[in-house]
């Protein structure tokens, strides 16, 4: 009998890495379609706990679905209207946003302002509205379908399927973490909005929404959200007002991330800080801004998938870090 041929271990690892790279390239190719679809799924998973909360309060399932869908529609449509209106006002006011040339570092600040204004996709506002309505209705339909999707998966894979159990556990972890993330972002956004009102910063609602949304991008999201209002404060009141807003931004963000967030969750994502940071740029390259929003959940999906196979478990271990409790036990 001929000897069974086995792929050398080193070649097996090369093949695995090559497949992962090809998968990323394929995702990048279909990103214009895949990005909004994944984002709608993500938003739906964040809304789903509210539906379950209504059921626990004694509402029937059908009534809970109707309430959730109606609130989602009005909240989504209202948010979209506010964003479009604020962007239109920003476009109209753009020529007046300049810093006194005699101010300290004014040349560089004006260059930043011109760069930001030149990169506002004025001609794509219609496309922004189109994507917004797609997300709104996709989320509404998915909220209605989500319980049926779960029952179909159980029927297809079997109630005792380990893979299905891992999937449900992963979704549960997502929901738990990102519901906490919503609370922290809301705390920070309200604090920032109060600062904007205190300094009478133009487009305060827009910057408040921006800080809430960009808070989902780890490490750099809040820094990006802080730039426009700081520059507007600089143009309106001078360098000292800009420095004052910067200090308040740092204080509020520090309280949110170093006190509120640890209070709400006992442990982190168990992802390496370096991996989280790099994942922002990888997924940003693959799917643009949507990829940066979804960098953490998508990277977690990959880690959980890699953990299921002996040949790829080492990659998952490289991307994770130990809990403090596990470290203490080892010591």
Image (tube, rainbow, N blue to C red):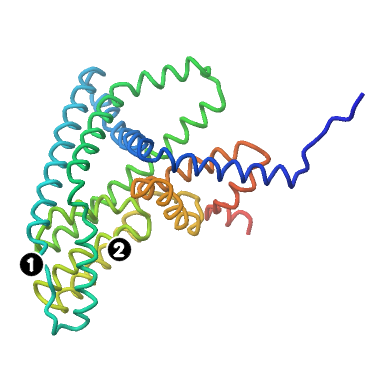
Q: Nearer the viewer, residue 303 or 10?
A: 10
What's the residue at 15%, 83% (across, down)? 103
Point out the image quarter for the C terminus. bottom right
Q: Position of residue 97 (x, y in %)?
A: 11, 67
Mark earlier in primary sequence (2, 1): 1
Q: Nearer the viewer, residue 108 or 194?
A: 108
* Pointer 1 residue: 96
Q: Is residue 216 left or right of residue 94?
A: right
Q: Is residue 306 left or right of residue 240?
A: right
Q: Is residue 171 left or right of residue 73?
A: right
What's the residue at 35%, 43% (across, down)? 178
Is 113 situated above or below 61? below
- Kindly indicate the quadrant of the structure image that contains residue 49: top left
Is 62 situated above or below 45? above
- Kindly indicate the quadrant of the structure image that contains residue 130: top left
* Pointer 2 residue: 223
Label 2 close to label 1 by CB (< 8 Å)? no
Is 266 situated above or below 111? above
Q: Position of residue 140 (x, y in %)?
A: 25, 27
Instruction: Please rate how many residues cluster around mark 1, counting C-alpha atoms within 10 Å: few if below 14, some from 14 to 19, many from 20.
Output: few
Q: CA distance from mark 2 to mark 1?
A: 24 Å
Is 88 situated above or below 56? below
In the displayed image of the protein, which residue is found farthest to the front?
123
Q: Position of residue 27 (x, y in %)?
A: 46, 40
């Amino acid at each position: 009998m001929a000897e069974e041929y086995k792929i050398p271990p080193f070649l097996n690892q090369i093949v695995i890495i090559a497949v992962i790279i090809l998968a990323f390239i394929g995702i990048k190719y279909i990103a214009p379609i895949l990005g909004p679809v994944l984002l709608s799924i993500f938003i739906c998973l964040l809304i789903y706990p509210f539906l379950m909360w209504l059921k626990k309060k004694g509402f029937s399932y059908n009534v809970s679905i109707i309430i959730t869908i109606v609130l989602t529609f009005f909240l989504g449509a209202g948010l979209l209207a506010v964003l479009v209106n604020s962007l239109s006002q920003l476009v109209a006011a753009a020529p007046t946003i300049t810093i006194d040339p005699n101010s300290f570092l004014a040349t560089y600040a004006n260059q930043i302002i011109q760069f930001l204004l030149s990169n506002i996709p004025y001609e794509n506002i219609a496309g922004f509205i189109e994507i917004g309505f797609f997300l709104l209705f996709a989320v509404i339909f998915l909220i209605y379908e989500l319980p049926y999707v779960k029952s179909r998966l159980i029927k297809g894979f079997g109630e005792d399927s380990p893979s299905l159990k891992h999937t449900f556990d992963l979704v549960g972890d997502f929901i738990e973490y990102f519901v906490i993330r919503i609370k922290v972002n809301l705390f920070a956004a309200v604090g920032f909005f109060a600062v904007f009102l205190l300094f009478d910063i133009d487009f305060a609602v827009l910057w408040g929404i921006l800080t809430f949304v960009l808070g989902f991008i780890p490490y750099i999201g809040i820094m990006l959200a802080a730039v426009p209002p700081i520059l507007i404060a600089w143009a309106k009141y001078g360098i000292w007002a800009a420095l004052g807003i910067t200090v308040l931004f740092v204080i509020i963000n520090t309280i949110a991330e170093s006190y509120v967030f640890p209070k709400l969750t006992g442990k982190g994502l168990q992802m390496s800080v370096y991996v989280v940071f790099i994942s922002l740029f990888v997924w940003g390259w693959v799917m643009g801004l949507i990829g940066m929003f979804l960098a953490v959940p998508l990277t977690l999906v990959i880690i959980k998938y890699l953990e299921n196979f002996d040949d790829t478990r080492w990659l998952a271990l490289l991307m994770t870090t130990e809990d403090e409790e596990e470290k203490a036990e080892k010591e």
